[in-house]
Image (cartoon, rainbow, N blue to C red):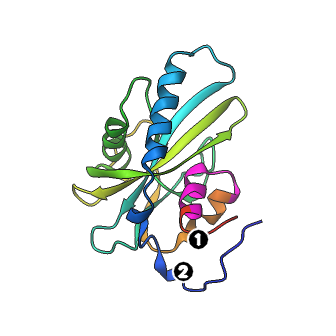
Amino acid sequence: MYEVPQQQDHKHAGISGILNRLDSSACDTFIDMLKADALNLAKKPARLFAIAAVVIDPTDESKFLAVKRPSNAKSLPDVWGLPAITVKYGEQLEMATVRLARDKLNTQVKFLGCLGLASVGRGEYELTLMDVVVRLAGKEPSVWEAPTEQTKYVQQQWTNELLILQEAALKGSACSRILLQSQGITY
């Protein structure tokens, strides 16, 4: 069950103060897990690593970029979430972040830090995902112009409404859960 904290002003606070919640130990743990997994590629079930970006609005630091998954998405169709990408074997965290911005949003970002880490079972594989916090460093993001060959988002919006992520979190979205929990919203 999804619970909203007793504070009613959470709705308008958005991600204000998120830079105070960055967790360098999450970065270190994620990098260690990537290294350990590279040494054990035959492990069953398979493990995938991914990052999702909390993109801070350059004009209002209480807002973040939410993206909507297509109706034909293999997982979590038609829900709002954060832009995400699978980390390639041997890829450094900062390079995966650059690739996410380029391939999924058609822009550039500056890596600011890590917010949190979660693992979830997806049936045939285990997904370990980390939310990273980034600041826009290029042009306005555009999911419509993004060159990705993977999941192509169908909508985007700058928002301070964290509850836009509720449906995804309830359906198992690790990135949505990490961001909501970091803001004191449990489900």
Kindly give the residue lying farthest to the bottom in the view shown: 8
Q: Residue at x 38, y 63 (%)?
A: 19
Name which residue type carries label 1. Leu
Q: Is residue 157 above or below residue 128?
A: below
For the point 35% across and 42% down, which residue is it? 103
Which residue was labeled with disc 1? 163
Residue 20 in percent (x, y) is at 40, 64
Q: Does the rendering let one see residue 107?
A: no
The stretch of residues the image draws in magenta is 170-181
Mark 2 closeness class: few <14, some 14–19, many ≥20 residues within 10 Å: few
Q: Residue at x 56, y 55 (%)?
A: 178
First along the sequence among labels 1 and 2: 2
Residue 11: give its label: 2
Specify the principal SS of the magenta part.
Answer: helix
Q: Position of residue 1 (x, y in %)?
A: 78, 65
Identity of the residue drawn at 47% across and 55% down? 154
For mark 2, give the secondary structure: helix
* Res. 137 visible in picture: yes
Decide: few, some or many residues near mark 1? Use Cα within 10 Å; few <14, some 14-19, many ≥20: some
Asked whether residue 178 is drawn in magenta, I would say yes
Residue 174 in the image, given as x and y percentages of width and height? 60, 49
**Residue in front for this viewpoint, 95 or 138:** 95
Residue at the right extreme of this rendering: 1
Where is the C terminus found, in terms of image quarters? Answer: bottom right
